[in-house]
Amino acid sequence: MHTNTFNNWKTLPLMLLLMAFTSSSLAGDKARSKLPSITELAATTEGFEVLYAALETAGLDGTFDGKRHYTVFAPTDEAFTRLLEANGLTPADLLGSGDLLVSVLSYHVTRGDRQSGSVLAAGALKMLDGNVTSTGVTDNGAMIDDAVITGVDIKARNGVIHIIDTVLIPPGAPLISAPPVR
């Protein structure tokens, strides 16, 4: 009986740590559940009108409004404008491109919650479309492929958003990349 008491005392710090972690995690989950979804953030944040229209048109708005967690690299309207101009397209052309639109959007998303430190440490990320992007830090700053990550760790109920200055082009897509003048 005395040995069991000793063993319980040895495990007490571990049990207290687990209880603290669990209660803090539950508090974090409760607070996070009150945040807008990825789709809601895209719909209500100035500068992401094209992204939101593209998500709606591609039928992905429901995907990023659900319970599954994603990390989205969100190009700004300015980035989409440069892409359209470089390719001689109108917004209607891009929104009407069907599979190409889904492919481009899916190349901006990876599964799970990836904070900026995790993104950069990874060196490469498998995207929702199955292709792999490269990540790292250059003289231009934190990068994913040829896009600079200009805003990080925006928490949503179902994931994380990082703002980028360039629309990422998946391998094999018939589009010309249009990085900003740096």
Image (spheres, rainbow, N blue to C red):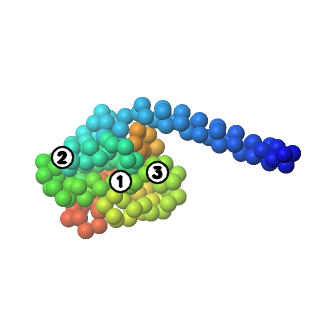
Q: Is label 3 in a helix, a strand or a loop?
A: loop
The mark nearer the N terminus, 3 or 2, is: 2
| Residue 109 badge | 1
Q: CA distance from mark 1 to mark 2?
A: 17 Å
Q: Are marks 3 and 2 in contact (CB under 8 Å)?
A: no
**Distance between mark 3 and mark 2 Cα atoms:** 26 Å
Q: Which residue is mark 3?
A: 114
**Residue at the far front in the pictured view:** 1
SS for callout 2 = helix
Q: In what element is the residue under mark 1? A: strand
Q: Position of residue 46 (x, y in %)?
A: 30, 34
The one of 137 and 162 positioned closer to us in this rendering = 162
Residue 156 seen in the figure: yes
Q: In 3D space, how far apart are the residues under numbered discs 3 and 1 (Cα atoms)?
A: 10 Å
Q: Is residue 134 above or below residue 105?
A: below
In the image, what residue occupies the spot 16% across and 49% down? Answer: 95
- The residue singled out by tag 2 in the image is 57
